[in-house]
Image (spheres, rainbow, N blue to C red):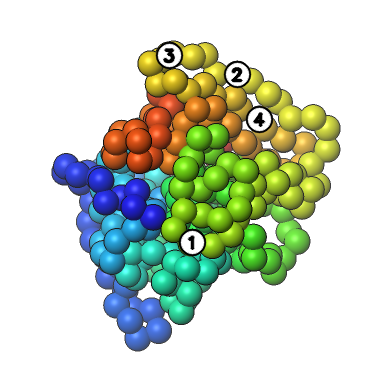
Amino acid sequence: MWWLVGLLGCASQVQLVELEVNGITRSYYEHVPDTLPAEPATMLVLHGGGTTSSRMGRRMGQFTGFSERADAGNYLAVFPNSQRGNWNDGRTGQGAEHIDDLAYFDALLDDLSRRHGIDRSRVGLAGISNGGFMTVRLLCERTEDYAGGVSVAATQPSALRCKSGEPVTIGWMVGTDDKAVPYEGGQVLGNRGRIKAAEQARDQWVARNGCTGEPRVRAVPDRDPSDHSTAEFQVWSDCAGGTKVGFVRLDGAGHTWPGGSQYLPRFLVGEVNRDLDGARWIEGFLEF
């Protein structure tokens, strides 16, 4: 996916950290608030794919707003780097199928525990595009390691099979006019694997989490009619183990981050919904 190729400008204040994973040097960026408490909560924010760079996490704090949100909320914001520009998220055609990213995230959490003494019960995930698919894979295959996560501009790989049936809080923010990752599912642009429709993935997790009753539904005020997009929240909160399922339908939005920048022309990636702040909604949904 070409989403991050268009991200220009300065990165927020982040520090590069390297670690060894299976004999390979991997890395991540972190944003540490000045008043970070002991045993802090941690938000991992995963970049999308599209290049061969191993430093794609650098601008994610600025792009998503999570560096600023971490300062306000006094939690650790971490921006992992894929090995060669793409995550092994459970799809074929990414060029990353041979990379053991599960081992990388295992090592990353251990490193954060060693360096910052993080609260392992309060680790959240958020990711866009390839990073959104990887977020779902981690919640599916490493359920016990995360308090929850939100996938932006991504649904779920069709071939992904969860190893555990344990419930976990999960959410999506998806544009109905996404030309790269079709809202209705099927083949990702560029033959990068088959995916489930957004609402199919949502319904699967509603069932897996044992949610009962109807969701709480709220239309977001159309604060910026010029974005040609509107938003609706759906949240199932009566679910097993105190988990939740959230779904933000972004009518008219494309392959973009809600409230983020128009990082590439509209004819390539579509509209950015400007009625809500994606990072702020994720933070609230995951109770950070």
* SS at badge 4: strand
**Classed neighbour count for the residue bearing mark 1: other residues with Cα under 10 Å, few (<14), some (14–19), many (≥20):** few
Amino acid at dot 3 = Pro
Q: Residue at x 47, y 43 (%)?
A: 179
Judging from the image, what secondary structure is the residue with disc 2 in? strand
**Tag shown at residue 225:** 3
Mark 4 vs mark 3: which is more N-terminal?
3
For the point 46% across and 79% down, which residue is it? 98
Is residue 233 visible from the viewing direction of this image?
Answer: yes
**Comparing labels 1 and 3, the label whose residue is closer to the camera:** 1
Residue at the location (43% across, 32% down)? 258
Q: Counting residues from the N terminus, which is met first, the one under dot 1 or under dot 2?
A: 1
Q: Crowding near pointer 4: few (<14 within 10 Å), some, many (20+)? A: some
Task: Say whether disc 3 or disc 2 marks the residue closer to the N-terminus.
Answer: 2
Instruction: Quote the CA–CA distance across marks 3 and 2.
Output: 14 Å
The amino acid beneath tag 2 is Ala
Q: Amino acid at mark 1?
A: Asn
Among numbered discs 2 and 4, the one appearing first in the sequence:
2
Instruction: Give coordinates of residue 61: x percent, y percent.
Output: 30, 44
Number of residues whose C-alpha sits closer than 10 Å to that of mark 2, classed few (under 14), some (14–19) or many (20 or more) = few
Q: Write down the residue under mark 4.
A: 234
Instruction: Tell me the residue that label 2 is attached to.
Output: 219
In the rendered structure, the answer to whether residue 78 lies left or right of residue 172 reads left
Residue 104 in view in this figure:
no
The residue to which callout 1 is attached is 191
Kind of residue at disc 4: Gln
- Cβ–Cβ below 8 Å for labels 1 and 2? no
Q: Say left or right for 269 vs 15.
A: right
Rate crowding at label 3 as few (under 14), some (14 to 19) or many (20 or more) other CA atoms within 10 Å: few
| Dots 1, 3 in contact, CB < 8 A | no
Q: Are marks 3 and 2 in contact (CB under 8 Å)?
A: no
Which quarter shows the N terminus?
bottom left
